[in-house]
Image (spheres, rainbow, N blue to C red):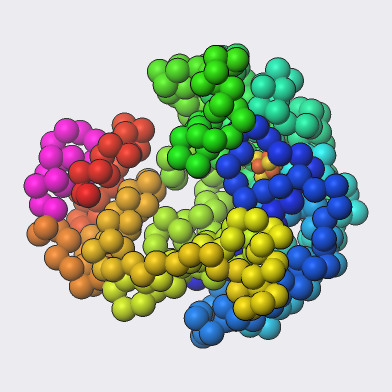
Amino acid sequence: MFGVYIHFPYCLSKCPYCDFASRAEAIIPQGRYTEAVLLELRSRQKEFAGRAADSIYFGGGTPSLWDPDQVGRVLAEVRALWAVAPQAEITLEANPGTTDEARFAAFRRLGINRLSIGAQSFAPAQLISLGRKHSSQDAVRAFETARRAGFENVSLDLIHGAEGQTPELAARDAALAVALGPEHISCYALTLTGLAEDVPMAKAARRGEIELPDDEASAEMGEAVREQLSRGGYARYEISNYAKPAFESVHNTLYWRGGEYAAAGCGACGFARRANGGRRYANDRSPEKYMERVEQTGIGEASSEDVGSEEHLRERLFTGLRLAEGVDLADLERDLDLPVRQRYANEIERLVGEGVAELRGSTLRLNQRGLDLHSEVSLRFF
Ligand code: SF4
């Protein structure tokens, strides 16, 4: 599988929990940023020559703030550089409050066929604790606008674990999302680790200015959300992602299955296969520095690493086990030329014995309990 990821780093305001490469700017340099992305896409083509894209993804930041004309130029460039499958999924992330019907209709006319809307919550108090600038009505309006503009594949994002949230409130958010009837729902627990340790919300929590639900309460919220989504007919196809049949996200599944992705834009990360491993690169996370780098060198790369076959194997197991479909170990052996089943025979037996995984044929998959314990379970392979 191959996809193209394009990052648009600008937002209306910076949310206090956000560790993405994103920035609030009063004036977005639409033309200059587009030129940089176009230049980088042309440079990246060589590394991904001859691939056909199953997916194109505009992520952010808030790409719904990108002028449709500029998005059209980027899409045209992607289509000129790579074959794009006729049924390719073409997604654009949108935030409530950055949407109007003319803009959504323009995105639809460009061939974008999936919108991912960052609703996060429908409860006013939760939106305030998350520092979101939109109202719950804005989120509903964004969804309805997407439908009116002709989008038949819409995803809603929810976050649970904000200050003051309870399992009942989390369940209510999920029920309201289900009632709207999107094709896909992502439900993430608020996480303030890793890069997010330095975001304002994490600092406020450390200073005791806000009190976030503990892990146990957050897990209860996750359970309450899952129950609502399952009742609404959404299958949990990945730890935090739910879909109606045939509406699983092609782009994210490509990441989890170990596919390749060309990436352009500030903060974007790409991965190209090489023999049994690959090369991963990450672009500069500062929009200004990104544009300068591209203008000087043609790419925005700030770092890169070679991924050996052993490391790629561990990544494939780690990400593949996030999926309810699991990992076909025989496929993995053929792909990486490594004796996966023989090497991990003890670990696999233990996971099955502990009742968190099943091995059917050559496919190892985690059950619901295993998915909840994914990090712990997949560490056994490290
Ligand atoms: S809108 Fe999204 S990308 Fe922008 S600051 Fe908020 S969470 Fe981050």
State the residue at coordinates (76%, 73%): 35
The x, y position of residue 46, in whole percent, is 53, 84
> In this view of the protein, can residue 114 be seen by the observer?
no
Q: Classify 28 as above or below 135.
A: below
Residue at point 50% right, 81% down?
47
Q: Is residue 26 above or below residue 78?
A: above
Estimate the x, y position of residue 184 in percent, counting from the top left. Answer: 59, 44
How far across and how far down the image is residue 339, in percent? 14, 65
**Vertical arrangement, residue 145 with respect to residue 27, above or below:** above
Q: Quadrant of residue 204?
A: top right
Q: Is residue 318 visible?
A: yes
Instruction: Return the residue found at the far right.
Output: 102
Task: Decide whether residue 346 is among the magenta residues.
Answer: yes
Residue in the foreground of this view, choosing between 39 and 230 = 39
Residue 222 is left or right of residue 291, and the answer is: left
**Is residue 284 highlighted in magenta?**
no
> In the figure, is residue 91 to the left or right of 231?
right
| Residues drawn in magenta | 344-358
Q: Name the residue nearer the viewer: 289 or 262.
A: 289
Image quarter for ligand 1: top right
Give the residue drawn at x 90%, y 54%.
Answer: 102
